């Protein structure tokens, strides 16, 4: 029988986890919060994950198991869980994590004490493949009610932005957001835009205790994702999409979008800097981004905050035959630059344009101007809708 208190549902996306998911399920069964239900969605797996989960659920009426008969992928499996969830709060209990018994009760108390908050999360103990253990902490966000400060913390290069993804969130808010979206880079870091969208709607509350334990496994999904400059760039632009499609007052959107576009430009600047030393690498990374609708979507992002839309050269410049003589140059970097002089000049110019654009977006006066411009836009009727929806269609 389910007890009293706010209703909470634990969402467990499982795949190929027969060897370790029992630790996760047992930690959920030990939770001290009285009003908890658990839904496990087992994606089509080659092992006995379904059998393990169904055997456990047969002994505890709070647990329910969904069998996926077609491969959903990580995003599809988590969204299947969100569609089934009913309650006040929810959280993703990933199949290789385990939780302290007070995890749910502590985070529920934090959210109940702050009705304007979106997420409550704890510190995290992380066990790496080599057995090394560290504590993951995202500081400086829980006491900040200001939207811009919240985005600055999440978008900082040196902070573990993903930790709140293992927190408790308001279920009605998650439904309005529409779940975790696939986009140009597929499922790669798709939880980052999801968290950004949640941050647009409310505060993130840190409970300074280690209540969640994350274990990296040899087959962990994040270990199978291949990172690249182009994929990271696609993720950052998808955050801009979240800022556009979020149901926000014009003033809140006008404060958020300059930060999100600046984060995209910062990734582009890093990519450009690497390209100055290695033009062929830049060309390889640019290939998946050269075809529409990515360039159109990027230009719309720039226009939305009052920037020149042609900050990036999405075209290809083939080096002329005479640059083969560059192989005689003494160092590797000089040989690369000698083979691609036109590309190197274009990248140097692009670096200057990006630096100026970032300076504009980060200045107080320019942000004020951008806000005034954004507040006057009618986003549902703007060109944003078509290119962004084509670039990142939701999974059917």
Image (spheres, grey):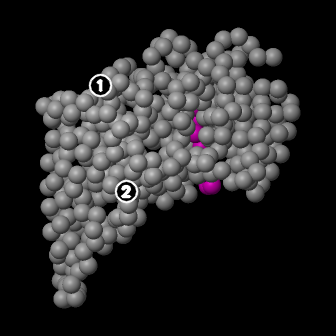
Q: Position of residue 286 (x, y in %)?
A: 34, 65
In percent of the image, x 33 and y 55: which residue is there? 296
In percent of the image, x 63 and y 30: which residue is there? 99
- Asked if residue 213 lies in the magenta stretch, the reply is yes
Q: Position of residue 18 (x, y in %)?
A: 75, 48
Q: Position of residue 137 (x, y in %)?
A: 44, 32
Kindly state the secondary structure of the residue where label 1 is placed: helix
Classify residue 64 as left or right of residue 118. Answer: right
Kindly state the secondary structure of the residue where label 2 is placed: helix
| Residue under numbered circle 2 | 294
Front-most of residues 346 and 168? 346
Q: Position of residue 16 (x, y in %)?
A: 71, 52
145 versus 282 height, above or below:
above
Quarter of the image for residue 319 reads bottom left
How dense is the environment of label 2, judged by Cα within 10 Å: few (below 14), some, or many (20 and up)?
many
Classify residue 336 as left or right of residue 252. Answer: left
């Amino acid at each position: 029988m389910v007890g009293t208190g706010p209703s909470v549902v634990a969402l467990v996306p499982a795949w190929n986890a027969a060897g370790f998911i029992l630790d996760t399920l047992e930690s959920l069964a030990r939770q001290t919060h009285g009003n908890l239900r658990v839904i496990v969605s087992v994606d089509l797996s080659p092992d006995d994950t379904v059998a393990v989960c169904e055997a456990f659920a047969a002994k505890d009426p709070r647990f329910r198991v969904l069998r996926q008969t077609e491969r959903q992928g990580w995003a599809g499996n988590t969204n299947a869980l969100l569609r089934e969830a009913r309650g006040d709060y929810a959280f993703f209990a990933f199949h290789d994590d385990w939780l302290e018994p007070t995890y749910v009760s502590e985070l529920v108390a934090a959210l109940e004490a702050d009705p304007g908050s979106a997420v409550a999360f704890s510190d995290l103990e992380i066990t790496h493949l080599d057995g090394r253990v560290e504590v993951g902490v995202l500081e400086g966000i829980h006491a900040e009610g200001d939207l811009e400060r919240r985005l600055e913390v999440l978008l900082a290069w040196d902070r573990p932005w993903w930790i709140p993804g293992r927190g408790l969130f308001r279920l009605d808010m998650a439904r309005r957001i529409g779940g975790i979206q696939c986009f140009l880079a597929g499922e790669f870091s798709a939880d980052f835009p999801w968290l950004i969208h949640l941050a647009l709607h409310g505060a993130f509350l840190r409970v300074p205790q280690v209540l969640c334990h994350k274990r990296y496994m040899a087959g962990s999904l994040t270990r199978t994702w291949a990172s690249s400059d182009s994929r990271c760039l696609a993720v950052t632009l998808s955050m801009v999409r979240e800022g556009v499609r979020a149901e926000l007052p014009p003033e809140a959107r006008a404060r958020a979008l300059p930060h999100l576009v600046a984060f995209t430009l910062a990734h582009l600047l890093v990519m450009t800097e690497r390209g100055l030393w290695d033009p062929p690498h830049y060309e390889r990374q640019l290939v998946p981004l050269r075809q529409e609708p990515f360039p159109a979507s990027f230009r719309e992002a720039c226009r939305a905050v009052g920037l020149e839309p042609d900050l990036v050269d999405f075209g290809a410049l083939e080096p002329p035959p005479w640059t083969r003589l560059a192989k005689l140059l003494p160092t590797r970097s000089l040989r690369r630059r000698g083979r691609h002089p036109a590309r190197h000049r274009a990248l140097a110019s692009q670096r200057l344009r990006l630096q100026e654009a970032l300076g504009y977006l980060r200045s107080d006066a320019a942000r004020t101007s951008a806000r005034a411009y954004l507040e006057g836009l009618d986003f549902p009727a703007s060109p944003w809708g078509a290119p962004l929806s084509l670039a990142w269609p939701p999974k059917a």
